[in-house]
Image (tube, coloured by chain):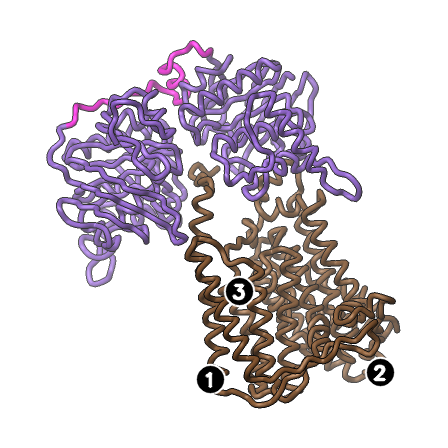
Amino acid sequence: MKLELRGITKRFGPLVANDRISLTVEEGEIHGLLGENGAGKSTLMNVLYGLYQADEGEILLDGEATRFAGPGDAMAAGIGMVHQHFMLIPVFTVAENVMLGNESTGFAGTLNIDAARERVREISARFGFDLNPDALIETLPVGVQQRVEIIKALSRDAKVLVFDEPTAVLTPQETDELMAIMRQLKESGTSIVFISHKLREIRAVADRITVIRRGAVVGEASPTATNAELAALMVGRPVELTVHKDPAKPGADALVVRDLKVTDATGHVHLESISFAIATGEVLGVAGVQGNGQTELTEALLGLQAHVQGSVELDGHQLVGKSVRKVLESGVGFIPEDRQADGLVGGFTLAENLMLNRSHGKPFVRFGTIRRKALEAFASDKLVEYDVRASGIEATANQLSGGNQQKVVVARELSRDLRLLVAAQPTRGVDVGSIEFIHKQVVAARDSGVPVLLVSTELDEIAALSDRIMVLFRGKVVGIVPGDTPRETLGLMMAGERPEGIVA
Amino acid sequence: MSTTAKVPVPVTEDDIAESARRGALKAPIVLGIVTMLLSLLVGMKGREGDTSFRFAEPTDFFEIPEITVPSSPSLTLIVILLALCTVASAFLVSRGRRTPLWLVGLFAVLALTGFLCWAAAGETIPVIGLIGGSIALAVPLVFGALGGVLGERAGVVNIAIDGQLLFGAFAAAVFGTILGSPWGGLVAAMCAGALVALVLGFFAITYFVDQVIVGVVLNVLVIGLTSFLFVQLLAKDTEGLNSPVHFEEISIPGLAKIPVIGPVLFQQTMLVYIMYVAVFAVAWALYRTRWGLRVRAVGEHPKAADTVGIKVIRTRYTTLLIAGLIAGAGGATYTLVSVPQFGEELTDGAGYIALAAVIFGRWDPVRATLAALLFGFTKNLAGVLSVIGSPVPSQFMLMLPYVVTIIAVAGLVGRSRAPAADGIPYRKG
């Protein structure tokens, strides 16, 4: 089926999320939709899927204008969507999820679960998936859950399939498998819209690429375009895709972690026998697919986890069992993975956010009272130094874009005398310009002799910044390898395999 | 758009085994404590005399003879058996296995028999009256719990059960009198329950107000409203407004003559038979129909339901209204069966016990019903024992249902999980 979007405009109050976007997807084509986080890709797809109503413009399927009042209409018209955050119910079985909203029923609305099982088996067989229709979703790995999403769409005879950032939660191997599935779908005549901000993946699989920036289409490209060309189109100016850094000059080991074990309140083990060391002036990257213990690792270092065994020594001082305040006072800077939940207080001003980790005394508090003048001077300096685009230090944090919010967090953490920097997902959901800036700051911190623990699920970021890379899988260290280890090797390690010649 | 939502970690067999091991320890500990308490009764307050258990009704097909046992020796024997059960449970747990349900059931029956042997020394326990009365007392709790299960499965915490019961009781009294028919009273009660549910839905679903707060406020509002109307209208004209026609007891031919079970289950009022149907209807609808699948989906992950074309808001409203109809029927039990007429604060917090039954029953209609029956039983036990004159102070016996509620909810629920979106309003986009 041929899909055309003509002049789609969607506004949220004063914000124009989509500005007269036009897009054509031919039958049996994989169309890449490339844009930064916040460029308006997901809004556009939600309009297409009937979750939002467009303010202007129209949607044409095989040349006929259609209107979708809700997702039900869109599905009936043959549009399927594989959502970035899976729309699956964890406590339902595969068959129940697939049939939901499209149930075949018998007498008095009785569910015909056998028909749903049969449908799952039939579609799985078509694509060579090995899927048990009665498995509960929550027991399935993320990659398999995504296949359930695909089956869900196909079971409704989707002719146009939208993949919204589908690779964010996958290992490189699973990503390759997904691309194979996409090509298979294309062969069978399905049209595909592939939304991503990852240049390499878009180029690998798309037949044509549309680039959007700030809610508007800025150009079309073919997959033969170079990364640099695409990135420039996406960002609106030439960008440096590689981080310039000198070789590390590691000193003595500063952070030494031995046999770290983290469990949660129910006794579930999240991390086990984690041992590593970071020297001064060195970046240790922690690679792994989301949810393999990275969050617990950074929180354990900071003293945010309740059940921690083993030893964490910073400059010879034990950190395990210390309060968060003591850990911070021993010189640990922390960029948390979720800036909105853990990094900032949304309703506070930038000045207030900048002193959050120094609310106990000097230099901003005297006799329990905030020293306004000192704080204002400090905050104004930092906004300039860290290139934070805001109306001023009295702006609240939630008025800022993701990139500028993150720069505030980075500014706060780096403006102390650090003995260790823990950076968790420092550039997630951040625009390319800010990514460049934050990467430079991390490298600068390293060069000034601070040991850096960098956690990221983006392999590109790990490869760009790390001097050594530690790969986590299911709460264990698969191995610690040099920073120039090939992607393929890292990909295998992220799936839990340890290639020959690598020691844990 | 949230770019930082956490990816759910797959639950592995190991996780389940691990948490099961920790939960499994509770069973032998609780059994041990109960055994110790009963053995204290033997040691410190042994009682002379025999205890009789009467099982028969004159109408039965055949008569089971009365069983009479000597009080103290029986209790001693039972305590020994209880200790054995506890040891067996501890042994199984030490081997990494769970205490089987039948063992817990056996233990409960034994412990109860032992306690009755002791408490009713020198007296006769009317077993049929004890169990049959429990069902009668549990009827409003069961209806309330079913309403609670439905609401919460759709994602709306129904704290207003108590208000629905009370308003239902009030409406049943007034309309049962005016219309001169218990059926008219029942329909009015159901509508009253649905009305309370509609107000709850209006604030909780449409205006995103905190559901617990709205629910509690509604309960207080209904207490105030019914008390006001009672004093102003009903108390002044009892004849014309507060003398409802009651449901008669109906014996089901044949079934009612089965010993023990017959008089307990099949010599009841129409409302009890409606309750039987309601329990199975709700369970069937929730698990076997398209409607039920959609309700559960909306309660677990409303956004996912929305993306497959299910109307979340509408589903929540209809489910909540049905829940209100059911809970309202529970309220009718008070004024159309239990008591002659409506009185202020008639429900005595039964709605909150029904809510506990929902949690104890792990949001499952059949289990919640069983939990409600358990609460009904403890309440009736308190009544029966105070009639036959037990050595336990009556105030303490009156506490029993509430103590059992707390223990049940706090200690014995085990690995239970509320619907994921329970209590969270759905905002589109």
- The residue pinned by badge 3 equals B409
* Any part of residue A356 in sight: no
Residue A493 is situated, as x and y percent measured from the top left of the image, at 34, 27
- The residue pinned by badge 2 equals B239
- The residue pinned by badge 1 equals B43
Nearer to us of marks 1 and 3 is 1
Which of the 4 quarters of the picture holds residue B400? bottom right
Tint of chain B:
brown
**Count of numbered circles in the view:** 3
- Give SS at disc 1: helix
Q: Inspect the magenta stretch and tell me whether residue A244 lies in it.
A: yes
Which residue occupies the foreground of this view, A163 or B362?
A: B362
Residue B106 is situated, as x and y percent measured from the top left of the image, at 58, 66
- Give SS at disc 3: helix
Q: Residue furthest top?
A: A224
Nearer to us of marks 1 and 2 is 1
Tint of chain A:
purple
* Any part of residue A375 in sight: yes
The quarter of the image holding the C terminus of chain A is top left
Q: For the residue marked with disc 1, what is the amino acid?
A: Gly
Which of the 4 quarters of the picture holds residue B272? bottom right
